Image: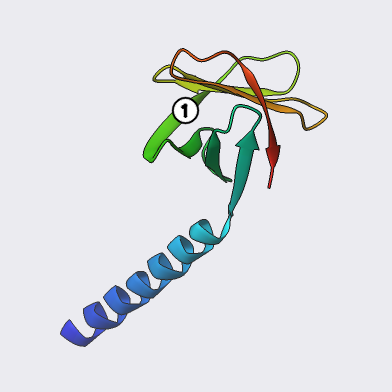
Amino acid sequence: MGRHKAILLTTAMLAAGMTSARQTEAQMFQTYRCADGTQFVVGFYDDDKRAFLQIDGEPVTLAKRLSVAGKRYSGVGITLTIGKTGGTTVKHLKRPVTACAVI
């Protein structure tokens, strides 16, 4: 009976490992540079509605918000807007909204 449990445990661990490997592959990272000199990296994961930013040397997680024209994410005083046509703006640290482009 012990041998069967070991086989089942090994199979379960392998299946879990393959599942987590697939999840990490389903991601997209982009680096942006803004008109005011701000530079940030944003990451999106297929199974997560949040945006993960690295801005001003700090990691920030932004929640997806309701938006009519594109996608909007905000949190911790930062708002990231990605328009339907691809135009991107960011507002952070009480700075005005600034246009950004993928580099």
Q: Which corner quadrant of the image does residue 67 belong to? A: top right
The location of residue 86, given as percent across then percent down, is 78, 32
Q: How is the image coloured?
A: rainbow
Q: Which residue is mark 1?
A: 62
The location of residue 80, given as percent across then percent down, is 58, 25
The location of residue 53, given as percent across then percent down, is 48, 38
Q: Residue sitting at 68 percent across and 48 percent down?
A: 103
Rate crowding at label 1 as few (under 14), some (14 to 19) or many (20 or more) other CA atoms within 10 Å.
many
Q: How many discs mark residues in the rendered view?
A: 1
Which of 32/14 is in front?
32
Q: Residue sitting at 43 percent across and 16 percent down?
A: 77
The location of residue 10, given as percent across then percent down, is 31, 78
- Amino acid under label 1? Leu
Which of 85/67 is in front?
85
SS type, badge 1 = strand
Can residue 1 be seen by looking at this rendering? Answer: no
Q: Residue sitting at 53 percent across and 63 percent down?
A: 22
Quarter holding the N terminus? bottom left
Task: Reply above or below: 25 against 37.
Answer: below
Q: Residue sitting at 46 percent across and 69 percent down?
A: 18
102 vs 50, left or right, is right
Task: Reply above or below: 34 against 22.
Answer: above
Task: Reply above or below: 13 against 43.
Answer: below
Can residue 34 be seen by looking at this rendering? Answer: yes
Toward the bottom, the furthest residue is 3
Task: Reply above or below: 82 against 11.
Answer: above
